[in-house]
Image (cartoon, rainbow, N blue to C red):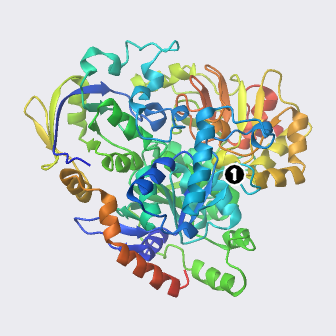
């Protein structure tokens, strides 16, 4: 009786771990981007080593790339010089080492964790790594996917393997069903609120139960994406018909007879009945409310109708509230909104844009509020334009951009000014994450869109 | 890498819990393409005031921080982004060890690969260290033992192989490459199983 994680781990164990040495774990797919790869390429050059399996490596640029159309397509140079250098360096490195790159003007470019599933490159049972902690996203397909540092990026380049200690397993059992206006983002924020920002440290989460089975792939990716925000390296969901339907026909997915064989294999990727997990937690999705963070880590989160806990006397808690300009006892509803950001590897997919469009249709962004909507990939941008969402966004007064990480992290020119309140669908409300002094409140796309229209923090169910 | 056996130093205390890697090194400094020079940007948003001058209230700016190689921090240090720039910045500033009651997984792995010791201690030891900034501590990596100036000492958990590599100045990549024949065999077997 093995867990899903055990099955994937064992299938990739080149050498099992011992008391003295970690396991050698084979890596099926290595995703790279411009920010965490340059120093790893430098190591290869110094050691005169090739990338061992360029055919198992995909490169894109997303973190430091601008999202304004003139800088991406219009011939206007990238405004941030250092970012322009990083982009050039990845172009050179990819060419030198024979790695496929979805570059600045490629129609398939986008956020690394959005394009790999979109291409069908992310598949059940794979091991997937990337120099980015939100690699946990790919676990939505039943892959074991986790973020690594740049030294490990170099290890995978040189060997297609990593030295790893086997993590523990953690079952997140979710009963019931999410109610209208409550999204996968609210569910994962509720889970993080329950187990805490380090509750998953040393573990791989497996999200299970009827509420998880009822989620679309876009929603499952939102859940797995934020596993790292609970401290877990990875989050996984067993593949099922929803997974297979998503992957079928995608360019990098198996085709023809190979497809049938692959699906037969993928069906075995479930935790056996009676498999034992090292830890577990139970939630009822039907009790989850729209959630919002009020502090400076994703565990400082509340149902949107709740009030901030009164001062606990904890210095760190008080410091977080001071940074946010909030006080214990404050209601979240009605608080000021300056910037609204809809996008990121957490909530930049078509289902997220559809949710935002549902609320923004025929409505206007409140005066004094800036709404930035950034698709997770160029493909999603085209799909949102074809579905008419982009027109709804523009008519509402939103700024509709090219794909990228954008305002999730302030390193590409899209930033929130000091002291401003940003209602954001991204994954981290850390101090300064969206710009020096920026105050971030994490929410779902529904809540972000509703708050943009109302000009204050609003329960999205008022607009459904 | 140079062998690392001992760290004997005074401590600097930043008592906050959940210090994330965006605080250690904010994203706007990640546009670098080298590992060097990040020390001046370490904890930039806490360390410098809006006008760029040093914040006198911040621990790293106090005179006793000069030369300190051990950072003592609150619970769950290094959470968030996988950026290896975080240990690079700490090392470039001069730190060789971080002590907390809990250290986030990716940061811990990145630190070990760069010769920054991630040391997890019990609540009582942590509380003593948080209350005594500037304490002279001795970290014996071979014995995996931390000794306080009171004479009290505690063992800390550290992954055996990473410790072996640090003590002997061995690069883990060399070991991994020594297993290339196993990796090739794995590839052949798995492609036969059509995975």
Would you call the spot at circle 1 few (<14 residues within 10 Å), some (14-19), or many (20 or more)? many
Rendered location of residue B126, percent (x, y):
24, 34
For the C terminus of chain A, the quadrant is top right
The residue located at (57%, 24%) in the rendering is A436
Tell me how many marks there are: 1
- A368 vs A35, nearest the viewer: A35
Residue B54 vs A44, above or below: the answer is above
Q: Secondary structure at mark 1?
A: loop
Res. A158 image quadrant: bottom left
User: In the rendering, at what x and y percent does residue A282 appear?
Assistant: 51, 56
Q: Which residue is mark 1?
A: A110
Residue A7: percent from left, percent from top: 46, 74
Q: In the depicted view, which residue is nearer to us: B101 or A253?
A: A253
Seen from this angle, which residue lies furthest left? B151
In this rendering, the answer to whether A3 lies above or below A441 is: below
Specify the subunit that label 1 lies on: A
Q: Image check: B21 left or right of B4?
A: right
Which of A221/A385 is in front?
A385
Q: Is residue B130 left or right of residue B35?
A: left
Could you tell me residue B97's position as x and y percent? 26, 38
Let me know if residue B77 appears in the view. Answer: no
From the viewer's perspective, is residue B131 above or below residue A216?
A: above
Query: What residue is at 40 percent from the left and 81 percent from the top?
Result: B185
Residue at 49% of width from left, 25% of height from top?
A320
What is the quadrant of residue A164 in the picture?
A: bottom left
In this view, the residue in front, B153 or A2, is B153
| Quadrant that contains the N terminus of chain A | bottom left
Answer with left or right where residue B52 lies relative to residue B141. right
Q: Looking at the image, is A140 positioned above or below residue A179?
A: below
Residue B32 shows up from this direction: yes
């Amino acid at each position: 009786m093995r867990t899903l994680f055990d099955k994937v781990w064992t299938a990739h164990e080149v050498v099992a771990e011992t008391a003295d040495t970690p396991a050698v774990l084979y890596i099926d797919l290595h995703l790279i981007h411009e920010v965490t790869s340059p120093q790893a390429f430098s190591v290869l050059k110094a050691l005169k080593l090739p990338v061992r399996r360029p055919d198992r490596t995909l490169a894109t640029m997303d973190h430091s790339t601008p999202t304004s159309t003139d800088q991406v397509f219009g011939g206007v140079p990238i405004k941030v010089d250092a970012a322009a250098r990083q982009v050039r360096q990845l172009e050179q490195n990819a060419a030198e080492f024979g790695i496929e790159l979805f570059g600045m003007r490629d129609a398939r470019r986008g956020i690394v964790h959005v394009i790999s599933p979109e291409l069908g490159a992310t598949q059940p049972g794979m091991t997937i790594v990337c120099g980015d902690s939100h690699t946990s996203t790919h676990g939505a397909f039943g892959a074991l996917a986790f973020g690594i540092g740049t030294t490990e990026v170099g290890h995978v380049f040189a060997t297609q393997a990593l030295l790893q200690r086997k993590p523990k397993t953690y079952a997140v059992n979710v009963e019931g069903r999410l109610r209208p206006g409550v999204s996968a983002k609210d569910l994962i924020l509720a889970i993080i609120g329950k187990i805490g920002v380090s509750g998953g440290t040393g573990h791989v989460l497996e999200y299970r139960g009827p509420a998880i089975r009822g989620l679309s792939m876009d929603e499952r990716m939102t859940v797995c994406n934020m596993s790292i925000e609970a401290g877990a390296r990875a989050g996984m969901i067993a593949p099922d018909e929803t997974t297979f339907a998503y992957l079928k026909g995608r360019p990098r997915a198996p085709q023809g007879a190979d497809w049938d064989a692959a699906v037969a294999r993928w069906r075995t990727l479930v935790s056996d009945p009676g498999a034992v997990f090292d830890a577990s937690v139970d939630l009822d999705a039907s009790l989850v409310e729209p959630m919002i963070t009020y502090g400076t880590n994703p565990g400082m989160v509340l149902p949107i109708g709740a009030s901030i806990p009164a001062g606990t006397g904890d210095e760190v808690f008080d410091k977080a509230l001071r940074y946010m300009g909030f006080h214990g006892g404050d209601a979240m509803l009605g608080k000021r909104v300056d910037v609204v950001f809809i996008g990121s590897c957490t909530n930049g997919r078509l289902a997220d844009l559809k949710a935002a469009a549902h609320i923004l249709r025929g409505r206007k962004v409140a005066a004094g509020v800036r709404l930035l909507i950034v698709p997770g990939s160029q493909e999603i941008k085209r799909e949102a334009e074809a579905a008419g969402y982009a027109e709804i966004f523009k008519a509402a007064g939103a700024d509709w951009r090219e794909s990228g990480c954008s305002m999730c992290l302030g390193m590409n020119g899209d930033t929130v000014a000091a002291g401003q309140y940003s209602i954001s669908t991204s994954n981290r409300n850390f101090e300064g994450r969206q710009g020096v002094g920026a105050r971030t409140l994490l929410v779902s796309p529904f809540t972000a869109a509703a708050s943009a229209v109302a000009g204050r923090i609003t329960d999205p169910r008022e607009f459904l | 890498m140079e062998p690392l056996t001992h760290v004997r130093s005074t401590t600097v205390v930043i008592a906050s819990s959940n210090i994330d890697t965006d605080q250690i090194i904010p994203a706007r400094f990640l546009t670098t393409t080298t590992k060097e020079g990040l020390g001046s940007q370490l904890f930039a948003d806490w360390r410098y005031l809006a006008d760029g001058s040093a914040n006198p209230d911040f621990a790293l700016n106090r005179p006793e921080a000069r030369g300190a190689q051990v950072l003592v921090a609150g619970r769950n240090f290094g959470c968030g982004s996988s950026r290896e720039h975080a240990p690079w910045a700490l090392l470039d500033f001069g730190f060789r060890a971080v002590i907390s009651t809990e250290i986030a997984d990716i940061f811990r792995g990145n630190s070990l690969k760069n010769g920054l010791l991630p040391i997890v201690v019990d609540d009582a030891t942590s509380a003593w260290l948080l209350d005594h900034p500037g304490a002279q501590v001795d970290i014996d990596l071979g014995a995996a033992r931390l000794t306080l100036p009171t004479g009290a000492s505690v063992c800390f958990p550290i992954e055996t192989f990473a410790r072996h590599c640090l003590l002997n100045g061995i690069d883990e990549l060399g070991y991994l490459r020594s297993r290339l024949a196993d990796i090739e065999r794995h590839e052949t077997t798995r492609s036969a199983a059509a995975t």
